[in-house]
Amino acid sequence: MAGLFPAPSNSPHALVVGGTGMLWEVSLALAQSGSLVSVIARHRERLRELSQESAKQMGEINPISLDYHHTPQLVTALKDAAQHFGPIELAVIWIHSTAPDAPLTVARLCGTPENPCQYFDILGSTSINPSRAELSQRSQFADLSNIRYHEIILGFVQEAGGARWLTNQEISQGVLQAIEEKRPRFVVGTVEPWSDRP
């Protein structure tokens, strides 16, 4: 499923992987801000709903229905999107650890050395578990001149009586703030003290 409509002139091309779940609001916000947003997700119906909601807000979504575990399909879809809408200038990536090669596969197909993509890799809090060796994925992206790599770590929220995981809305708001600030590492919520994780 690909919505290959003509891109508005000079619209930046953004990519959201996992944009129909916890990043739903991120997809809509990027589209509403003037980007043409290619969204990769498995569920066609959710992609259709996202595209319809974006159209109501005068935003444009290019829905791409695929499972990112299938590398050849992922590569083909990203190359097609870049051919139709231009190089991906902003990428927001939420990929489960069950597809360890997918984040780098996506990164290699974003941006250009002349115009690097702002690449935001969303990771769970276990990626910075203090009891384990440094698990940052940053090193595997270091040689790519076509991206500027950023990590977004999803933490938790401390409340009276305990701690809880972030809501989808809190995650989306944090991700949008991280995109705006462009820090190398941005934590949504908190990850300290580690012993308080829910």
Image (cartoon, rainbow, N blue to C red):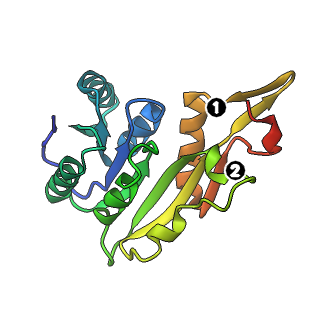
Q: Secondary structure at mark 2?
A: loop
**Which numbered tag is attached to residue 59?**
none
173 relative position to 51: left or right: right
The residue pinned by badge 2 equals: 129
Name which residue lies at 80% across and 32% down.
158
Distance of label 2 from label 1 (alpha carbons):
17 Å
Q: Amino acid at mark 1?
A: Leu
Within 10 Å of the Cα at label 1, are there few (<14), some (14-19), or many (20+) other Cα atoms?
A: some
Q: Quadrant of residue 155?
A: top right
Q: 164 or 11: which is nearer to us?
A: 164
Q: Amino acid at mark 2?
A: Asn
From the viewer's perspective, is the residue at label 2 or at label 1 nearer? 2
Q: Is residue 193 above or below residue 146?
A: above
151 relative position to 67: left or right: right
Name which residue lies at 60% across and 42% down.
174
| Place of residue 85 in the rendered image (x, y in percent of width and height, measured from the top left) | 19, 54
| Place of residue 191 in the rendered image (x, y in percent of width and height, measured from the top left) | 74, 45
The residue pinned by badge 1 equals: 166
Q: Secondary structure at mark 1?
A: loop
